């Protein structure tokens, strides 16, 4: 009830929720109380969570915040959310996001922008919460849920977490099932939690992770007790600092934050080593070929026949065209155009195949660092703090630069954790990123502390 009234108070200004499932929440909470009264209960018993609109929730609004999925209520539940409810969590509603998870500012949602609860000191100007999981991050930051599910294809958990002072874990590819998560770029997509504290994050992560016969890329490894990793000593852990992340034009405050992180880890007994990830500079352009290519294929299914919106036409081809023209927003259309272009017969070798080769080189850079004994890598999470809506309007390439520190992790399938690390001179939160070995999430929770 407290969370539902927090939503009522805060959501009109923040726009983090696109659907509030109050009756279901109270019903689930009641059943939680009953289980607790019987001395039963799971790891998340009675904990109220928000769910990114990308996760299929049975009988409940699931539209990836796109017009094209108007009215879609799936007849099934995603594996990740099913895992959370099985552990006793309570669903408060569905959270706003960039349309089909394409964006870094939550300005591409059909349901309008999400507003970051934070302001620059002395200013009332609204700022973006980051994206695409901007609703998840803003809802957590504004106490409208105890934690939220999110997804990360190129930074969409870590970047909004950094911009709202919350904690975001993008797990190793395969750690969470993608079943029932609306597909953006299937070889990069992973679900993960956004929470206010590291401990909450570890607890929620444990419930979300599972092997799943319905997602053959999910991995059959035991799910560790991530919470237990939080208190461990960092003594002797080797932390790599990649030279290539000192990109041109990095604000002095971000550089100082990074140094602060290095000093904290050193003081706690970790060993800091300079490393090189030489193909870093190709990660962003390669990502913006691979992700749209996969998206153009995944989004072919929205044809006006099977789901959501249908805009009639003269014949079926006309109906497809009208539906897709009206149903997709401009960023989604841009991605489909880029994707079909790089996959087309004449350009496949020049762009898509080349991007896939670059992806392998990026992965090898990380392999080499880990093989040389590095346990984790420390970088800034974002190149800057939260910005004003419209700051990059008309300049998609500038907008894509927000993902410069996060996309490498998805290209290599690695886990990445964003933790709040301080405020900039305007009083806005900044985050650091820890990158781990495959299935090295525990080490990240240890270091994130
Ligand atoms: N900003 C990136 C993109 O638009 C990442 C999105 C994501 O991780 N879902 O593709």
Image (cartoon, helix red, strand yellow):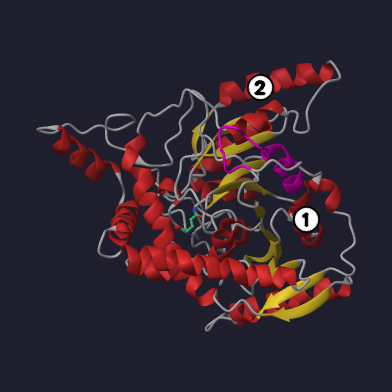
Image coords of residue 249 (percent x, y): 52, 83
Specify the quadrant of the image occupied by residue 236. Answer: bottom right
Q: Dot 2: within a 10 Å radius of its alpha carbon, few (fewer than 14), some, or many (20 or more) residues?
A: many
- Residue, disc 1: 445
* Sequence-first disc among 2 and 1: 2
Answer yes or no: is residue 379 visible.
no
Q: Is residue 263 magenta?
A: no
Q: CA distance from mark 2 to mark 1?
A: 30 Å
Q: Is residue 208 magenta?
A: yes
Which of discs 2 and 1 lies nearer the camera? The answer is: 1
Q: Viewer-proximal residue, 431 or 23?
A: 431
Image coords of residue 130 (percent x, y): 52, 58
Q: Which residues are magenta?
A: 200-218
Q: Residue at x 55, y 40 (%)?
A: 178
The answer to whether residue 251 is left or right of residue 319 is right
Image coords of residue 422 (percent x, y): 71, 67
Q: Is residue 19 above or below residue 76?
A: below
- Residue, disc 2: 28
Q: Is residue 6 above or below residue 422?
A: above
The answer to whether residue 285 is left or right of residue 161 is left
Q: Which quarter of the rendered picture does the N terminus lie within? A: top right
Q: Dot 1: within a 10 Å radius of its alpha carbon, few (fewer than 14), some, or many (20 or more) residues?
A: many
């Amino acid at each position: 009830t407290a969370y539902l009234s927090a939503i009522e108070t805060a959501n009109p200004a923040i726009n983090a929720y696109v659907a509030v499932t109050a009756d279901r929440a109270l019903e689930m909470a009641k059943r939680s109380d009953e289980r607790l009264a019987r001395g039963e209960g799971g790891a998340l018993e009675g904990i109220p969570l928000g769910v990114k609109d990308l996760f299929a929730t049975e009988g409940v609004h699931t539209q990836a915040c796109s017009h094209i999925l108007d009215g879609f209520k799936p007849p099934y539940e995603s594996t990740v959310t099913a895992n959370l409810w099985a552990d006793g969590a309570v669903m408060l509603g569905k959270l706003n996001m960039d349309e089909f998870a394409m964006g870094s500012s939550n300005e591409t949602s059909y349901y309008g922008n999400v507003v970051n609860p934070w302001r620059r000191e002395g200013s009332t100007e609204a700022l973006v919460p980051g994206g695409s999981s901007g609703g998840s991050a803003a809802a957590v930051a504004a106490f409208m849920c105890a934690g939220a599910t999110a997804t990360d294809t190129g930074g969409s958990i870590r970047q909004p977490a950094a911009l709202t002072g919350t904690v975001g874990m993008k797990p190793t590819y395969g750690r969470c099932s993608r079943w029932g998560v609306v597909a953006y770029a299937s070889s990069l997509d992973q679900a993960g939690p956004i929470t206010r504290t590291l401990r909450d994050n570890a607890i929620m992560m444990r419930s979300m992770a599972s092997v799943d016969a319905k997602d053959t890329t999910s991995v059959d490894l035991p799910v560790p007790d991530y919470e237990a990793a939080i208190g461990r000593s960092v003594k002797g852990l080797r932390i790599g600092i990649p030279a290539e992340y000192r990109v041109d034009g990095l604000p002095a405050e971000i550089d100082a934050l990074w140094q602060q992180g290095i000093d904290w880890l050193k003081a706690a007994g970790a060993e800091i080593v300079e490393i090189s990830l030489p193909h870093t500079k190709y990660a962003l352009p390669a990502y913006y070929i691979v992700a749209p290519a996969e998206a153009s294929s995944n989004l072919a299914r929205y044809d006006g026949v099977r789901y959501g919106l249908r805009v009639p036409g003269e014949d079926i081809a006309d109906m497809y065209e009208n539906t897709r023209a009206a149903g997709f927003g401009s960023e989604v259309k841009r991605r489909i155009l880029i994707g079909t272009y790089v996959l087309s017969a004449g350009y496949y070798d020049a762009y898509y195949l080349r991007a896939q080769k670059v992806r392998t080189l990026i992965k090898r850079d990380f392999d080499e660092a880990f093989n040389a004994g590095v346990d984790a890598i420390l970088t800034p999470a974002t190149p800057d703090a939260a910005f004003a809506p419209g700051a990059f309007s008309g300049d998609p390439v500038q907008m894509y630069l927000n993902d410069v520190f996060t996309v490498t992790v998805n290209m290599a399938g690695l886990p990445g954790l964003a933790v709040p690390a301080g405020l900039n001179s305007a009083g806005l939160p900044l985050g650091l990123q820890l990158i781990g070995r495959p299935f090295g999430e525990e080490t990240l929770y240890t270091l994130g502390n």
